[in-house]
Amino acid sequence: MESVAAPLSRSRVIFHLVIALAVAAGVAWGINLLGQRLIDIPRLRDWVRGFGPAAPLVFIGVSALAHVVFLPVAPFTVAAAALFHWPTAVLVMLVSHNLAANLGYAIPFLFGKQRMERLWNSNPKLAHFDQRIREHGFAAVLALRIVPALPFSLVSYLSALSCIRWPAYALGSFLGMLPGPLMMAFVLSHG
């Protein structure tokens, strides 16, 4: 006899999401705190340069994956500016941030976006928010990337769960993230 799992109630799903986000935030905070105490920029620069011509690609991969798991973007932006000359630093940051943003948008699709959408749309307040985001998706993402009122990864995940279409999300993310890496690399780069 085959047993069928009962669907989770809305409150149970929300509870699990809150716990998962709290754990992810705690891990990110702990790693960030540890990183602040352990990172030695000259030693890190030597380690990254040890990868030779592949160093920017290695940095992009590590940075993009770190953003997806809720690590803050700013330390990686500063590190890229410290590790690479100005034009390379800008390119590394833009590619890394955009790769992370698009991975973050894709992840909910891998873990049951339809189930989350049903939950999302069953709540009148969330459904109203979703409708507003659908109407102003590009501008909303652009604003949240220029003025990061929410964590980087959370913007990506919530955008995927809303009805923002990927082209509007990707363009809003790219344009919204453009000023930060340009300014940071210009100010901090040693090249």
Image (tube, rainbow, N blue to C red):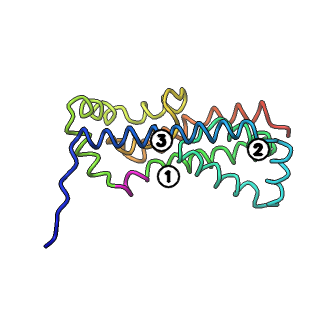
With 29 as the anchor, is 125 left or right in this view? left
Count of marks placed on residues: 3
Which residue occupies 48% across, 30% down? 150
Tell which circle, 3 or 2, labels the residue nearer the N-terminal end. 3
Q: Residue at x 43, y 53 (%)?
A: 107
Residue at mark 1 to residue at mark 3: CA–CA distance: 20 Å
The structure residue drawn at horizontal position 82% and vertical position 54%, both measured from the top left corner, is 47
Q: Position of residue 145 (x, y in %)?
A: 52, 33
x then y, percent, for residue 126: 27, 32
As drawn, the residue found furthest toward the front would be 1
Give the amino acid type for the residue marked by disc 3 in the picture: Val
Work out which quarter of the rendered image holds the N terminus and state it: bottom left
| Start-end of magenta stretch | 107-111
Q: Mark 1 vs mark 3: which is more N-terminal?
A: 3
Is 109 within the magenta?
Answer: yes
Quadrant in which residue 130 is drawn: top left
Badge 2 is on which residue? 87
Q: Nearer the viewer, residue 51 or 133?
A: 51
- Amino acid marked by disc 1: Leu
Across and down, in percent, residue 185 comes to 74, 36
Q: Which residue is mark 3?
A: 23
> 191 or 113: nearer the eye?
113
Give the distance between the C-alpha atoms of the residues marked 1 and 2, in whole angstroms: 24 Å
- Whichever of callouts 1 and 2 sits on the residue coming sooner in the sequence is 2
- Residue under pointer 1: 103
Name the element at disc 3: helix
Left or right position of 119 against 154: left
